[in-house]
Amino acid sequence: MTFLQPGLRSRTTAIAVAAAAILAAAPRETAPGRHLEPRPMSIPLEDVALFEQIQAWLEPSSLVGSGQPGSDPLYEAIHLRRESFELFIGAADEDAVRARMQHVPYGGLILSAARRHDVDPLLVAAVVQAESSFDTEAVSSQGALGLMQMMPTTAEQLGVADAYDPGQNLDAGASYLAYLLRRADNDLVLALAGYNAGPGTVDRFGGMPPFRETRGFINSVLRVYIAHHRAAWAAVNPGGLDFAVLAGG
């Protein structure tokens, strides 16, 4: 299972080779003030930078936008490092994702709905957590219903007879999320903005709406989403970064 854009898949093997070479050549410690001589290297600099970004997504410090003074919103970091983020997300092992979903409420239903609509189940799980904290009876002040907080009009358009039914709600929510991702050309941030504020609002502002609620929602989803993927990665790479995963091996 992969959620990479087609244009990114062809680079994973080269990046994995670059990563291995970088780690093999990198010194483990550097004395303060010491300047290392540059090493001759045939690896393209853009691949070196890309690997460093992928490695950064594995670190807890990648969860910027935590509300700490001076921190940047997480969605801005993803916008700036979109390629490395998508490679990191796309490297998820299917068995590891399935195992991770066992620790998520309604994980089996989420997994099934996500597969039906070709959406990352960890993303669906992150949206559910941010929207309702897995409360099937949740009702927002605007009238959104159930696990994925479907508005009644949206639920009706998607053929949902009972928005409080977990299976129906999750299936419709995953379908809607898949639609928003296609509409936004797989731009995860804009798709999530559309989920919260409506795709028409995203179009009206020509991108991210200037609403605190929308930006907070996106940050909340992304923090959970990255945490899920980091945990899934760690489950199959207990010794650290596994280049075979990046290479698709």
Image (cartoon, rainbow, N blue to C red):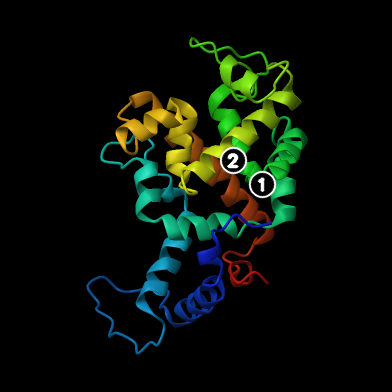
Residue 40 percent coordinates (x, y): 35, 90
Q: Position of residue 8 (x, y in %)?
A: 51, 65
Give the residue displayed 66% in from the left and 46% down from the top: 118
Residue 217 image label: none
Side of 229 where 102 appears, left or right: right
Q: Which residue is mark 1?
A: 118
Query: What residue is rendered at 30% in x and 41% in y?
Result: 71
Residue 117 figure quarter: top right
State whether residue 225 is above or below residue 46: above
Q: Which residue is nearer to you in this view: 40 or 147?
A: 147
Instruction: Read off the residue under disc 2.
Output: 178
Residue at image position (67%, 55%) is: 235
Question: In the image, 242: left or right of 141?
Answer: right
Q: How many marks?
A: 2
Q: Alpha-carbon distance for marks 2 and 1? A: 7 Å
- Label whose residue precedes the other's in the sequence (2 or 1): 1
Q: Is residue 58 visible?
A: no
Residue 189 appears at what percent x and percent y? 43, 42
Q: Are marks 2 and 1 in contact (CB under 8 Å)?
A: yes
What kind of element bears circle 2? Answer: helix
Viewer-side residue, 39 vs 163: 163
Where is residue 15 drawn, in percent x and y?
Answer: 50, 74
